[in-house]
Structures are given as structure tokens and as C-alpha cells.
Image (cartoon, helix red, strand yellow):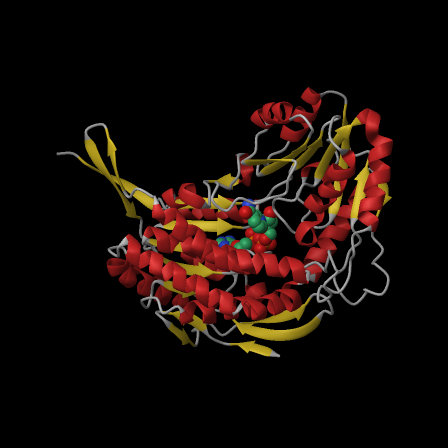
Amino acid sequence: MKIIDQIYINGDFVTPHGATTFDLINPTTNQQIGRVTLGDETDVNRAIAAAKAAFTTFSKTTVQQRSNYLQRLHDAMIKRLPDLVEASVIEYGAPRQRALASNQLAADSFLHYKKVLEDFSFTRKAGTSEVVMEPLGVVGIITPWNANASYICNKLATAIAAGCSAVIKPSEMSAIQTQIVTEALHEAQLPPGVFNIVNGPGNVVGSAITLHPDIAKISFTGSTAVGKMIARGAADTMKRVTLELGGKSANIILDDADFHTAIPMAVAACFMNNGQACIAGTRLLVPEARLEEVKALLKTAVANVKTGDPMNETTTIGPLVSRKQYDRVQQYIQLGIDQGAELLTGGVEQPAGLEAGNFVQPTVFTGVTRDMRIASEEIFGPVMSVMTYKTTEEAIDIANDTVYGLMAYISSSNEKKAREIAGKIIAGRVLINTLNHDPLAPFGGFKQSGIGREFGAYGLEEYLEPKTIIL
Ligand code: NAD
């Protein structure tokens, strides 16, 4: 049993004022593995006061000093990588390989921002004036459970690069991972108060951060529903907001694509991170005339997916994070069946031998139409909806027929054509014949997938305010 009964304020591990506890459950077994004591509004106020005090001097640091801090944060995180991988497997259910990639990315985000600082202009010319890009203040960072360390670290790296201080509220379901991240970041010996980490419930700690007048900006990753609450709450004090929200990304397979590569890639795009990925390509759009071929390839590709104990090196899909998430995904699978979609593979029965955990079968529906809820709502589990199109224009129309706009995928052997289609897709990122991530290029959503961008120089701009000096 891991007992986590401290939060991190002003450079120290301290006992929270809040006394409520939250049980931490291993999703592979549904056994309790820990307990975290949650902070409350008093803890938020203390953390914000520490961050506000630290901002006075941290905002005046040089780029060189902040680059050094970023390097130290990276090095400290790397040292704890094995512990983080272990914790991500037992607390979140991430397959080992995925856990490694995600936590490595977390550590690397500090280096990515060190790189951005190398040629970022904090002083610019506009018209005849000088424009100084100033850190905007104390940033409130609120993150979800599906890649805990990478959200904390990427957002913190951006804040450090900008010269902002931060109060971080991770998901309470990730407390064991957060504890390791906090211990690692503490080792980097930044000035006290520059970052503070308060475990707690969203409606208490998250909400207190959102409403506090001394928070200048919120950087949030999570559901669209909570993103809207944060945007409303932030408006009263005119906080800046970066919101990275949900998605229902389309994956368009063009007739000229190499289907033997594109279909397995589509399965990987949909089932990544146990299907709990905002960027998952959950709507597969295929030419109507090729449906039978696609079905056969999908069956083979899904048969190669290994659902099981995430500790196992060969597992590609682990359990869903919680019983609640499991129930939600099962309900969507039942809904697909009830609304008349055809179950190509998967279904509501639990995978054999894995009944103790939150495992669902990787599920593919064909015959999905736009009016079905599985075609429009974010499921956040390994469930794919296959839809057919007759013309490219129809494919684009289906792809854009969503309130979301985070990501899209295109497979084609004709790059020019794929680029033309990318130009017509309403999404923050379009990946052509790849699943690669670019940590220096902007990431974020059109429409209800969010506001603003993260990563690279575009992400940094969002933690700065331009000040014009006219002489
Ligand atoms: P969530 O919105 O329930 O919670 C996210 C965070 O917000 C948690 O820390 C939670 O405690 C906090 N929170 C909850 N209520 C709050 C409130 N009233 N005020 C302030 N904070 C509050 O999301 P989740 O279930 O943790 O994560 C899954 C969701 O996140 C999915 O919708 C997914 O698409 C989205 N997501 C988006 C991205 C992206 O980059 N666009 C990445 C990962 C996940």
C-alpha cells in the first residue's frame, strides 16, 4: 500500500490541510494499491501565495538560467524513469512499452523547451515600436490521468521557459505517478515556489485554481465538459486559457492507399493508450467499394492486438483506468449494437481470463452511420467506428461532421492529393501516412477540441503577454 499524505508547496513536501482520502486502485486487478490525502481550498491558497511570491524573482531570470533549470529538470526525471514506468503500469494500466514512451516524452519535454529557447525572441519590433514578451504570471495547470507525467512536464516546461511560476493539480487517480514526478522535480532544486503540486478533486482544488484572482492563466487538458466549466470560471478574472479537450478524429483511407500498411496503422491509431487517447483515430472512413477488403484486413490487424496484463512486454492493450471508465465504454459498445451497427470484432463480453480487471475487447463496428452516437461521441476506449464514403468530397464532409477538431489522419500514395485534403480538414493536426508526434510543432484543437496551442514556440507564446514600448 502506497500512502501519499503530502503535497508540494514552496519547495517542501507538506501535510495538506484537506483531510479527505481517495483510494488508488490497480485497474488490472481492481485491488487497492494506495491511498492519497486530497488537498482543499486552503492548500490551493497556500500554493498560489508561494507561486506568486516566487514569480517576482523567477520572472526576471535570464534565458540562460531557465535553460539550466530545464536541463536539470530533464536529468532528474530521467533518473526516475524506471519508477515512473512501473507506476504507470500498476496505477494506470499502461502497457509497458507505452508507459516507457510516454514517460520518456515527459522528461524530454524539458529539453524540447530548452531547444525552443535557443532561438526564441523575447524582444521584437512591430511598426516603429519595441515589443517585449513578458511572462504572464502564475499559471494554474490542471491535467488528466491518461498520460499523467507528460502533461505535467510539458506544461511545466512551458511555464519555466516563459518565466512563469505554477500551481499544478494532476488527476487524483494518478497520485502514485505524481508522487514520483514531484520527487524527481524536487531533486532539480528550482527556487522554492516556482512550482507547487496539489493533489485534490477537480470540483474543489481545480475549481479553486480556476477562480483564484492571482492565477493569470489556466492550462488545462481534459474533457470538453470540464473545459467549458473552466472557461466560464476563468472569465470573471479574465484569465488566459489554453484548453486541450476531447476528440473524435477521422482517419481517411483513400482508394490509392496501401491498405496492407494503412489498416494496421489505423488500428494502432484507434487503440493507442488502451483507446484512452484524445487523438485516437476512432472514425475510420473507407471507400465503399473496398469495404469487404477492409473488413478482412481489420480482422487480421485486431487479431494481432494483444489485450492483457500491461506488465507483459508484448501487451498492446491493457485495462481501462477505472471501473467507471470500463462501464462507460461497455455502455457505448452496447449502444452501437442497439443502434444497428455491425459488430465486426469485439463486443461486451470480457476477454477470457481477464475478468478481474477493467479489460474490454478491442471492438470494431462497421455499417456505422452519422446519426449513431458511436459516430459522434468520444468513447475513450478501444472502439472503432467504420464508415464508408463514395467520393473524396463525401469523406471530407464526414470527417468534418463533428463538434471536435483535434486531429485527423490520411492514408494515400498521392502526397499532393493528401495535402489538398488536409487543407480542407478542420483539425489542429493532420497526419499523412504516419502516427508520428512532432514535439516542436503546435498541438491543439479547432472547434470544441479546445482553445490555443501547446508545444514549441507556439505553446510558449501562450504563456507570454506582449508589451509594446513606444518611444
Ligand atoms: P476530466 O475533464 O474529467 O479531468 C481532467 C482534470 O480536470 C482532472 O485533474 C480533474 O480532477 C479536473 N477537474 C474535474 N472537474 C473540474 C472542475 N470543475 N474544475 C477544474 N478542474 C476539474 O478528464 P479525464 O477524465 O481526466 O480525462 C479524459 C478526457 O481528457 C477526455 O475527454 C480526453 O479527450 C481529454 N484529453 C484531452 C487531451 C488533449 O490534449 N486534447 C489529452 C488527453 C485527454
Is 246 drawn above or below residue 350 in the view shown? above
Percent position of residue 345, x then y: 85, 46
Percent position of residue 222, x then y: 55, 50
Q: Nearer the viewer, residue 446 or 403?
A: 446
The quadrant of the rendering that contains the N terminus is bottom right
Query: Which quadrant would residue 269 be assigned to in this image?
Result: top right
Q: Nearer the viewer, residue 239 or 177?
A: 177
Q: How many marks?
A: 0
Q: Nearer the viewer, residue 312 or 427?
A: 312
Is 170 drawn above or below residue 294 in the view shown? below
Is 281 drawn above or below residue 346 in the view shown? above
Is 457 drawn above or below residue 447 in the view shown? below
Q: Is residue 161 visible?
A: yes
Q: Residue furthest left?
A: 471
Percent position of residue 309, x then y: 75, 65
Q: Nearer the viewer, residue 156 or 80?
A: 80
Percent position of residue 22, x then y: 58, 70
Give the side of residue 311 with respect to residue 148, left or right: right
Give the side of residue 45 with respect to residue 431, left or right: left
Q: Is residue 143 visible?
A: no
**Residue in the picture at 47% in, 48% down:** 230
**Residue in the picture at 73% in, 49% down:** 382
The quadrant of the rendering that contains the C terminus is top left
